[in-house]
Image (spheres, helix red, strand yellow):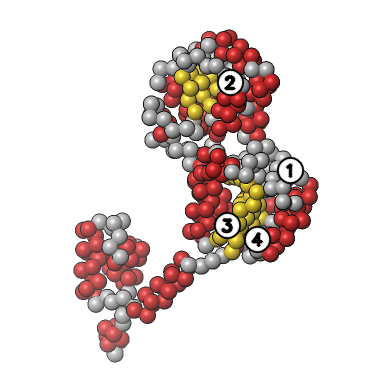
Amino acid sequence: MSGNSKSNKRATMADIANILGISKASVSFAMKGSPKISKKLRTKILNTANKLGYKKNPMLSAVLSTIKNQEKNKFFGCIALINANPKRDAFIKYPIFEKYANGVKAEAKKLGFSIFEVWLHSPNLNPTKLKEILDARGITGVLVLGHTHSNVFTREYIDIFKTLKVVSIGVKIKNLDTDCVCADKFRIAHHATTKVISLGFKRPALVLSEEIDSIVEGRFSGGFMSAQLLLSERNRIPPFLKLSLAIKKPKIFSDFISKYKPDVILSFSEHTNETLERINARIPSTITQIRLESTSEKHDWQAIDLNYEAVGATAMKQLADYVNRPLKNELYDVSLMTIISPKWA
């Protein structure tokens, strides 16, 4: 009787796995024809399955397929993407913000969220109206992008955002306790400087707004100066951070060039490039200018992938986790800083 019971039992993937001494996951991958399983092992698994008379459970397969399709098409709600830049078209005008936003939108689509964009500096927007918009759309999660200073919100706006789940992208918000996801500015500056030195440049200079370096807590200048340790002391040039002052007194920049005689100038933001154009900076043709946010076919180091899209996507994932979490997790009573590393070609 026990023999008949054994013979009538439906063979399972676990049975195949036990006989071959492998994991059930390996059997599953083999059944799906996954490239993760070698051809030799797949053949062995299929032969064993045939001997045992293994057959897929059609009812279970149908249920799993339905669940998978439902999850794929599931809608979890709407989140707000706040453009906190003074310029309405910042997500188009500045490549870094555009890439952040693209990463957010692509990930939101995958996760089943729609996005409502808000320009914080719109003349038609005020705290009361913003709250009405968010409430009407049932928005409880917000991503903040495009801010170029750390104190983004006025007191009235802070009262609204304190009731929401907020993740900042690129720059930490200091007057609101939120999480932040940003690119690794130190490694970006360090690698770029190291690379130009390896290309034969002897006197690299960094030109950057002091305000921008300050809001990323000195990570641009820190990476630059750390890489300069590869040079002799006489070839180390201090970073030029007085761009705001140079707008009023352009001679400050020309004096810097004359004094330190750099052979290459590195800039890491569109704001820097705009300022140099605004002050009509006359940089000698003998000095190479490298703008990290611009593409170039001349220097292979500019194949750096700054991973700005990944920053946006990670921020969206983090916010989705907060929005979907049914209960408050005390672990997240402290704000988190997530740093995304660049990739080198």
User: As shown in the figure, which amino acid type bears the numbered disc 1?
Assistant: Asn
Q: Is residue 38 above or below residue 211?
A: below
Mark closest to the chain's N terminus, 2 or 3: 3
**Is 102 rendered above or below residue 226?**
below
Q: Earlier in the sequence, mark 2 or mark 4?
A: 4
Residue that appears at 73% across and 43% down: 175
Alpha carbon separation for disc pair 2 and 4: 45 Å
How far across and down, in percent of the image, does residue 300 sit? 38, 29
Q: Which residue is mark 1?
A: 175
Mark 4 belongs to which amino acid? Ile
Question: Where the C terminus falls, by quadrant?
Answer: top left
Q: Quadrant of residue 210?
A: top right
Residue that numbered label 4 is attached to = 139
The amino acid sitting under disc 2 is: Asn
Q: Earlier in the sequence, mark 2 or mark 1?
A: 1
Quadrant the N terminus occupies: bottom left
The dot on residue 280 is: 2
What's under tag 3, amino acid-wise?
A: Ile
Q: Position of residue 291 (x, y in %)?
A: 49, 28
Query: Is label 2 in contact with label 4 (beta carbons under 8 Å)?
Result: no
- At mark 2, the secondary structure is loop
Callout 4 secondary element: loop
User: Circle 3 is placed at which residue position?
Assistant: 115
* Precedes in sequence: disc 4 or disc 1: 4
Q: Determine contact: label 3, label 4, CB under 8 Å.
A: no
Proximity of marks 2 and 3: CB atoms separated by less than 8 Å: no
First in residue order: circle 3 vs circle 1:
3
The reply to whether callout 2 and callout 1 are in contact (CB within 8 Å) is no
Most foreground residue, 144 or 329: 144
Residue 338, given in percent of the width and then of the height, sits at 57, 44
Near-viewer residue (110 or 43)? 110
